[in-house]
Image (cartoon, rainbow, N blue to C red):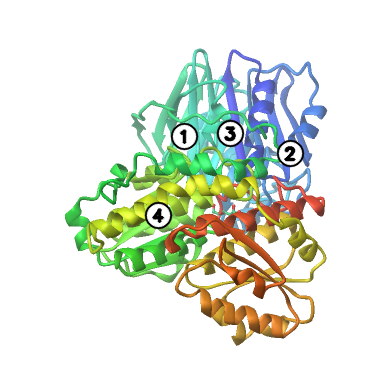
Amino acid sequence: MCGIIATVGRASAVPVLLDGLKRLEYRGYDSAGLAIVTDQGLALHRRVGRVRELSSGVPADLQSTVGIAHTRWATHGKVTEANAHPHLDGGSRIALVHNGIIENMGALKARLEADGVVFRSETDTEVLVHLVSRYYHSEDEAVTAGDPVAAVRAALRAVRGTWGIAVLFADRPDVLVAARNGSPLVVGLADGQSYLASDPHALVPYTRRVVFLEDGEMALIDANGVQTFQQDGGRIDSAVETLEEVWGDEDAGGFPHLMLKEIHEQPEALERCLSGRVIPETGTAHLGGMDLNPRDMARLSRVSLLGCGTAYFACQVGARLIEDLARVPAKAEIASEFRHRNPVVDPEALFLAVSQSGETADTLGAVREIQLKGGNVVGVVNVVGSSIARACGRGVYIHSGPEMAVASTKAFSNMVAALSVFTLMLARQRTLSAHQGVVYAEQLRAVPGLVKRYLADPGPIDELVKWVTDSRMVLFLGRGISAPVASEGALKLMEVAYVPCIAYPAGEMKHGPIALLEPGSPVIVVAPRDDVCDKTLSNLQECRARGARVAVIHTEGDDIGELADLSIPVPATGPFFSPLLTVLPLQLLAYRTGLVLGRDIDRPRNLAKSVTVE
Ligand code: F6R
């Protein structure tokens, strides 16, 4: 989604901005642009499409030591050069980039237009730059005129919504102004050079010394450092932190695509998540970052898991594990729905906010709603130091390592693994016997090896690819813990290959979706060996009876494969951990179908990696 990089100092700004934009590419975007201050005033360059197209249009001899740049993921207004950021004020003396949404754009725009302001884009952001200009340039605004921080502050008082902004003033090439409300920003500090980015990943080549801005804060950044302020007033002392876990370059490491690389990284990613946390000798688990003592866990009234997209499906797996194994009522919720239904927040419940990026606006919004209502929420997050991790203050890092392909694969597995560890810990402190704990701990510890074995010889995926490439619709079915796996498989095939899919709990199929089946319709059934497997097989038969072509993902050694048109066996594990195996063929199916159909696998159309707007 939208990304910001900015710099001020001794170094030439353009190479830093272009490099930063490239590092933000993985988030997904549709256009890019930059603005710098030169001897002639502001220079603006914008392009629809990739950063490399922007780079090729920027003259190599462009000299400047201050600038702001942006990757846009369209919200208000089409994907056009005019709508790309930065946006300029009427006199082209101020440039501004913005992540987030200005909700009262309509009223503000009407007022500005009535005062004679001419708009050059369809974006909500442009309202903001004209407002800043009004307060910075107008003689009537004695308090704010000529004062970059005061002008931005006054403009922000008029707007409602979310923002992470960087503002550049042609007559103040020594400074940048930034403000955050709901969209992340981090300031990077180096010797004689400062940076601003929406994602610490963009700062990695330059510095590890950073100041995270919090909601409601502003910053005045110059070559020597940063001053931070509350948006409504005084100075604040912000802590300078060191980025501990620094992600390297985006690099497919010998694989043709990042997605395939990340699928194959799952054995080591799972190992990282499980090792030191699962203790097979005692059948227990340990998650220090949760900061929950046995008494807290004994008292828990319920567990609510919140996430979006793939993270939500991981939450559904987690909820089933927690309820079944730890015997605590547990429910998964779509985070984007949560705060809009005025939820009752039980102070005795535990909420888990599950997110790869740690920046998903809907999940962060749910965290804030829970905290506002006195609830107890912890993060289950991949990106260290991300907004959700910091807002929760406690939690579990899933440790999948950098996930750069837009479609989530190894993060799903590590979310499920981290939730499995949590379940084991909770279960042992409530009802689970030591004997059973040992069994589950050993099963979990064996999973990375089984994943590795499956990926080395994944079975007839290409046959399945042939079925789905030309299909009008693919139906995914699963029961119990496999229902969310079916949903995740459908999501992956839709987003990577653009094949229409629906996923249903297998028992629900006969209550509606069965009407879609006609001879040859592809149906993918997830049916590992567990106590609902036989019931799922009845649904499989119902599909075949209507002429559908059925592929079944099942536990190797079972003769279930004979009941279907195509059998894809996966290694056996305990029934609670089967999603970590059954999801693998579905990831490969999405990847290989996308490949055959010539899709942009790592950057599927319209999608963003980090969804920082609601
Ligand atoms: C699917 C996908 C999205 C994300 C969702 C939540 O492949 O990537 O559905 O899972 O946007 O993102 P995080 O986990 O960063 O909160």
Residue 494 screen position, x and y as percent: 69, 61
- Look at label 1 and name its amino acid: Val
Q: Amino acid at mark 3?
A: Val
Drawn side of residue 324 relative to residue 222, left or right? left
First in sequence: mark 4 vs mark 1: 1
Q: Secondary structure at mark 2?
A: loop
Looking at the image, residue 44 lies above or below residue 480: above
Horizontal and vertical percent for residue 482? Answer: 52, 67
Tell me what residue is drawn at x 48 percent, y 21 percent.
189
Judged by depth in the image, the label closer to the viewer, 2 or 3, is 2
Q: Amino acid type of disc 4?
A: Leu
Label 2 or label 1, whichever lies nearer to me, is: 2
Judge: label 1 CB < 8 Å from ligand 1: no
Ranked by sequence position, the earlier of labels 2 and 1 is 1
The residue under label 3 is 167
Say which label, 2 or 3, has the lower sequence index: 3
Instruction: Report the Cα–Cα distance between label 4 and label 2.
Output: 31 Å
Spatial CA distance of label 4 from label 3 is: 41 Å
Residue 480, compared with residue 97, is above or below; it is below
Q: In the rendered structure, which disc, 4 or 2, sits on the residue that comes first in sequence? A: 2
Residue 346 sits above or below residue 212 on the image: below
Q: Tags 2 and 3 in contact by the CB under 8 Å rule?
A: no
Observer-nearest residue: 140 or 584? 584
Which residue is under mark 1?
143
Q: Residue at x 40, y 61 (%)?
A: 305
Q: CA distance from mark 2 to mark 1?
A: 57 Å
Residue 256 numbered tag: 2
Disc 2 marks a residue whose amino acid type is: Pro
**Closer to the N terminus: mark 4 or mark 3?**
3
